[in-house]
Amino acid sequence: MTGYMVRRFIQLMFVLFGLTVLLFLLLKAMPGDPAKVMAGIGARIETIEAIRVKLGLDRPWPVQYWRLLSGIFNGQLQAMTYHKSVWTVILERLPATIELGAFALALALIISIPAGLLSAIFRNSPLDYAVTTAALMGISIPVFWFALMLMMVFGVALRILPVSGRGVSVVIPYLGRWSFLTWDGIRHLVIPAVALSSVQMAMNARLTRASMLEVLRQEYVNTARAKGLRERVVLVKHAFRNALAPVVTNIGLQVGALFAGAVLTETTTAWPGIGRLMVEAINRRDQSVVFGLALFMAACYMISYLVVDVLYAYIDPRITYD
Amino acid sequence: MTEETLKMQPRDMALTVLCPGLGHIARGWWSKGALFMGLLAVQAATVGLAVSKHRFAWLAGPSKYWISTTLMFILLAGIWVWAFLHLRHAIRMSTENSTVCTYWQMAMQRFSHDLKGIVGLLIILTVLQVALFAPFFVRSDPLKMDLVNFLAPPSVEHPLGQDNFGRDVLDRLIYGARVALGIGAMATLLNMVFGGFLGLLGGYFRGITDSVIMRLLEIINAVPFLVLALLVISMWGSSVVSLMLVLGIFGLGPARIIRSEVLSVRETDYVLSARAIGVPTRRIIMRYVLPNAIASLLVVTTMSIGVNIIVVAGLSFLGFGVRPPIPSWGAMLQQAQEFMRTAWWMAVYPGLCIIFTVFGFNILGDSLRDVLDPRLR
């Protein structure tokens, strides 16, 4: 197991390194000069040049690449347009995204797992058709449109929930600059979380249903029924647990989808998380923040992927690596 | 009549798809074939009349548009449904009377009994029809502004309301179908070519080729696709062509699926024996490996058209996709966001169009998977 993990970790590092090269080349090929954006319209050439020198954009590409890479790892890299270090910018925005992602995922699991299980148990019943159709609908709905509809119905028309923004959040002094959720924040959270969870919900329900159907076909379920166990015991003790393993491990793979959904949902509902930061930074041509943030998202995704692989071996003893 | 003459040959089926009735004539059933072709001619003539310059000039008032458009739509849809029913009939004829069925004949027969897939196909054909015949469905230029009536709510004249420049929302939605389907289909085609090629190479040659390709895929997959697309588009500038290229080149999802399919096919005995008697690699791939991978390729293609349509809409919504004057569903939603409080009709309908289209592709893909892979039933 240890050998496997070490191998996977080296592989992860290799992929992240490849990604830094790819990202750097993409950023360098981006049109628009960050210095010009910072200097503003009608700035003198000397001013633009001065900013270029200050940001190090006049240096050769390998030097710039090294500055970005080393800056990410020692935390010294300054954002070009935010007057803070890149990590400060990202960490300030991160709690909002974690709140949103965690709520969305929790909501998705609470609804989708029972729905998927019931739909598999009562296969080909009206309930099953309702769940599968709803799930197919769910993967067809664009999250940003769903968020917009929720905002219009609950925010504008009914005035039950705040339309957009994050509301009041609390900064606890000893925990750095992280800000935390309040009651007002929870009310603001409802719309983006429901919108973001719609796709996860649909995907999880489909997966749970497929996995449960697969388990119900197994011989040991037949055996359990044949030896006279009550149907409830067969379903709960024998089928349910085994069906859940792939569902649980699939959660880790949804981190990437959550980030992508967060970009759209956060932009629509003005939620100040890292998804919105990404769009902002691309618009402001802030190469340092884009570089750091893309790398951060990739690292999160790959680490959760690795954790899931390891977890899988614990959940299912039949699987061994090496 | 012997059993052999009752059976519809593949050639006749193809002719039936080409033109209803042609297959019957080729089989020698003249009267039936002439009847079908005659009906088609009547239908085509009516459609031609409907879309001609003076269409329904004898009708007056605002109901003119409604009646003519609905009639036209029903007639056009009729042709599709009819062609489909004929195809289904031909499939049943060809399989029910024969003792041996090929894989594709069996798949076609299963598909003809699958309501889900048929509904999906009809949805897609409906959208396709609207996209193809867009100029006939709109009443005016979708770019024509009417600044006096900006943000006017739905009325008889403008059934889905007018946007912030007074442009008709319905007309823009109709032209938006062209953008959505066009970009979605082109991008998916490129996906299949690039991704399929990489997957084929990796799966068949394995070793160093495979590791290089897989690492490349891992690097590209590590970043959420939307973020990568945002970055590349901000680099290339947003246009319809760059959208197609970005989605086509970087959406390498099919590669993995093709690779795993190829890996399992290449271990089979018939590939081994082909290699043993010295069949060249290119021929093995074309004759044995590719046809076996086609089924899963078909499912992935259908599903990824839907995904690509959503991604294009998302990019346009963020302002990185189709540029505003071109009517596209995503860009319409972006505009609608500003007028959320006053003009609900600007936001609701483009979203419904996206859902309708993507839902069609998703249920068709779902049904194709059931049909093409009987193990999963």
Image (tube, coloured by chain):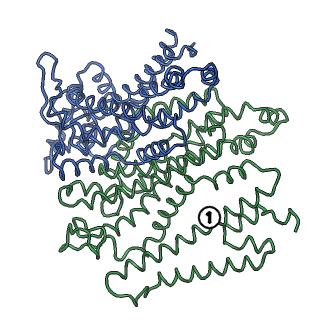
Q: In the drawing, does residue A224 fall left or right of residue B291? A: left
The answer to whether residue A261 is above or below residue B16 is above
Q: In the drawing, does residue A304 fall left or right of residue B320? A: right
Along the viewing direction, whichever of A128 and A270 lies nearer the viewer:
A128
Outermost bottom residue: B58
Rendering coords of residue A290 (x, y %): 29, 35
Q: Note the chain letter of the blue one.
A: A
Label 1: element kind: helix
The answer to whether residue A115 is above or below residue B330 is above
> Which color is chain B depicted in?
green
Along the viewing direction, whichever of B36 and A19 lies nearer the viewer:
B36
Q: In the drawing, does residue A205 fall left or right of residue B14? A: left
Residue where numbered disc 1 is placed:
B84
Question: Image quadrant of residue B205?
Answer: top right
Q: In the drawing, does residue A312 fall left or right of residue A226? A: left
Outermost right residue: B2
Question: Image quadrant of residue A77?
Answer: top left
Rendering coords of residue B216 (x, y %): 50, 32
Of the 4 image quadrants, the one containing the C terminus of chain A is top right
The answer to whether residue A297 is above or below residue B369 is above
Residue at horizontal 47 percent and vertical 54 percent from the top: B184
Q: Which amino acid does label 1 sit on?
A: Phe
Rendering coords of residue A253 (x, y %): 44, 29
Residue at horizontal 56 percent and vertical 83 percent from the top: B45
The answer to whether residue A257 is above or below residue A85 is below
Residue count near mark 1 (Cα–Cα under 10 Å), binned few <14, some 14–19, many ≥20: some
Residue at horizontal 24 percent and vertical 59 percent from the top: B344
Q: To which chain does the residue with label 1 belong?
A: B
Question: Image quadrant of residue B330?
Answer: bottom left
Rendering coords of residue B340 (x, y %): 21, 55
Residue at horizontal 60 percent and vertical 52 percent from the top: B114
